[in-house]
Image (cartoon, helix red, strand yellow):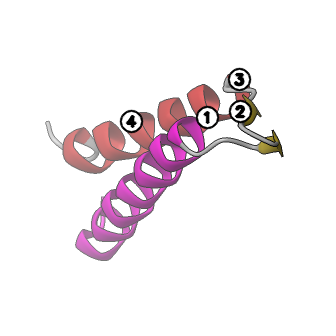
Amino acid sequence: MNKTVKTILLVVGIVLIGYGIYTMIAPEASVEVGGLSVEAQDNTDAYITIALGLVSVVIGFLGGRK
């Protein structure tokens, strides 16, 4: 595998992992009424994003080795 392709896969993988972790931590919706605050989030897309990032990083590291 070309060195440029490996580098692109590693960068994309790291970005996907970072974005997945960010979406997992940051709440999607929050409502604040007086002193009561309610936050809701759906993490299913975050898990998929992190998994794709991990796959990309692994392929970037192991791709082309014989």
Instruction: Give the residue at the far front of this rendering.
Output: 34
Residue kind at label 3, given as amino acid type: Thr
Separation of residues labelled 2 and 4 (CA atoms): 14 Å
Residue 57 placement (x, y as % from top left): 32, 45
Which residue is drawn at the image coordinates 75% and 27% (left, top)?
Answer: 42
Locate the C terminus by quadrant: top left
Residue kind at label 2, given as amino acid type: Asp
Which residue is drawn at the image coordinates 44% and 62% (left, top)?
Answer: 12
Q: Residue 46: which numbered mark, if any?
A: 1
Residue kind at label 4, given as amino acid type: Leu
Q: Label 3 near label 1: C-beta < 8 Å?
A: yes
Q: Label 4 near label 3: C-beta < 8 Å?
A: no
**Image: 11 above or below 52:** below
Instruction: Give the residue at the far bottom of this rendering.
Output: 4
Residue 23 placement (x, y as % from top left): 59, 45
* Mark 2 or 4, nearer chain start: 2
Separation of residues labelled 1 and 3 (CA atoms): 5 Å
* Mark 3 or 4, nearer chain start: 3
Q: Label 1 near label 2: C-beta < 8 Å?
A: yes
Identify the residue under disc 2: 45
Identify the residue under disc 4: 54
Identify the residue under disc 3: 44
Judged from the image, the secondary structure of the residue bearing numbered disc 3 is: helix
**Image: 48 above or below 61:** above
User: What is the magenta range?
Assistant: 1-25
Separation of residues labelled 1 and 4 (CA atoms): 12 Å
Separation of residues labelled 2 and 1 (CA atoms): 4 Å
